C-alpha cells in the first residue's frame, strides 16, 4: 500500500503559532484491488479517520441492480484496515493484515464507508465500521481485527 502526499491545504496549526500548514487529508493509492474496483480512500491526518467512497458503475452491482455484497465486504475491509493502520501510527501508516472481519448486511443501496478503532495494543487493532447511503442510513456494519506487520 502506498500513499500520495497530502493535497496542499490552507488551514494552519494553532499549536504552531498559526504558522505551519496542517495537512488535512492523505489519499491512499493502492495499485491492486483499488485500481480494479475503483474506490477512493482518504484519511484525515488530524483524527486518523478513514473514508472510502465508490462511484457505482454496472460492474459493482448484483443482478438486482444493487451494490454487490462482495463489493460491500471489500469496502468495509479497506476502511477498517486503513483505520487500524492509523491506530498504530498516524504518520507512518504501517501495513496491516485482516485477522477477522464480520459483516452484517442491514439494507441495500448506494454507499460510503467509515470506521473507527475501538481498541487494541502494539500488534492488534479492533475496528468497527459502517457503510451508509447518501442520507446517512446504515447499510452494513463490520467489526474487524487487524494485525500490524512489522518489517
Image (spheres, helix red, strand yellow):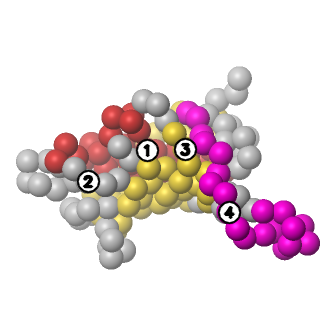
For this view, does 135 lie left or right of residue 96?
left
Q: Disc 4 vs disc 2: which is toward the camera?
A: 4
Q: Is residue 88 visible?
A: no
Counting from the top left corner in percent of width and height, residue 106 is at 27, 63
| Tag of residue 56 | 2
**Quadrant location, the C terminus:** top right
Residue 16 within the segment the image draws in magenta: yes
**What kind of element bears circle 4?**
loop
Q: Is disc 3 in contact with disc 4, using a CB cutoff of under 8 Å?
A: no
Q: Is residue 36 visible?
A: yes
Task: Give the crowd class for mark 2: few <14, some 14-19, many >=20 residues within 10 Å.
Answer: some
Counting from the top left corner in percent of width and height, residue 17 is at 91, 72
Q: CA distance from mark 2 to mark 3?
A: 19 Å
Q: CA distance from mark 3 to mark 4?
A: 17 Å
Counting from the top left corner in percent of width and height, residue 60 is at 22, 46
Please name the predominant secondary structure of the magenta segment in the image.
Answer: loop
**Which numbered disc flags the more N-terminal residue, 1 or 4?**
4
Q: Nearer the viewer, residue 59 or 103?
A: 59
For this view, does 92 lie left or right of residue 145?
right
- Which residue is the extreme one toward the right? 17
**Which numbered disc flags the more N-terminal residue, 2 or 1?**
2
Q: What residue is disc 4 on?
A: 9
| Tag of residue 28 | 3
> Across the whole image, how many numbered discs are drawn on residues?
4
Task: Give the crowd class for mark 4: few <14, some 14-19, many >=20 residues within 10 Å.
Answer: few
Task: Give the crowd class for mark 3: few <14, some 14-19, many >=20 residues within 10 Å.
Answer: many
Q: CA distance from mark 2 to mark 1?
A: 18 Å
Amino acid at each position: 500500500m502506498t500513499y500520495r502526499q497530502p493535497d496542499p491545504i490552507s488551514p494552519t496549526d494553532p499549536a504552531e503559532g498559526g504558522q505551519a500548514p496542517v495537512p488535512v487529508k492523505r489519499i491512499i493509492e493502492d495499485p491492486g484491488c483499488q485500481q480494479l474496483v475503483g474506490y477512493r480512500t482518504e484519511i484525515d491526518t488530524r483524527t486518523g479517520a478513514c473514508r472510502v467512497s465508490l462511484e457505482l458503475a454496472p460492474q459493482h452491482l448484483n443482478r438486482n441492480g444493487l451494490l454487490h455484497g462482495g463489493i460491500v465486504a471489500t469496502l468495509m475491509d479497506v476502511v477498517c484496515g486503513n483505520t487500524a493502520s492509523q491506530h498504530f501510527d498516524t504518520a507512518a501508516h504501517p501495513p496491516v493484515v485482516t485477522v477477522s472481519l464480520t459483516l452484517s448486511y442491514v439494507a441495500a443501496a448506494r454507499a460510503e464507508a467509515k470506521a473507527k478503532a475501538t481498541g487494541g495494543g502494539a500488534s492488534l487493532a479492533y475496528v468497527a465500521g459502517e457503510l451508509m447511503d447518501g442520507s446517512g442510513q446504515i447499510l452494513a456494519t463490520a467489526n474487524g481485527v487487524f494485525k500490524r506487520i512489522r518489517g
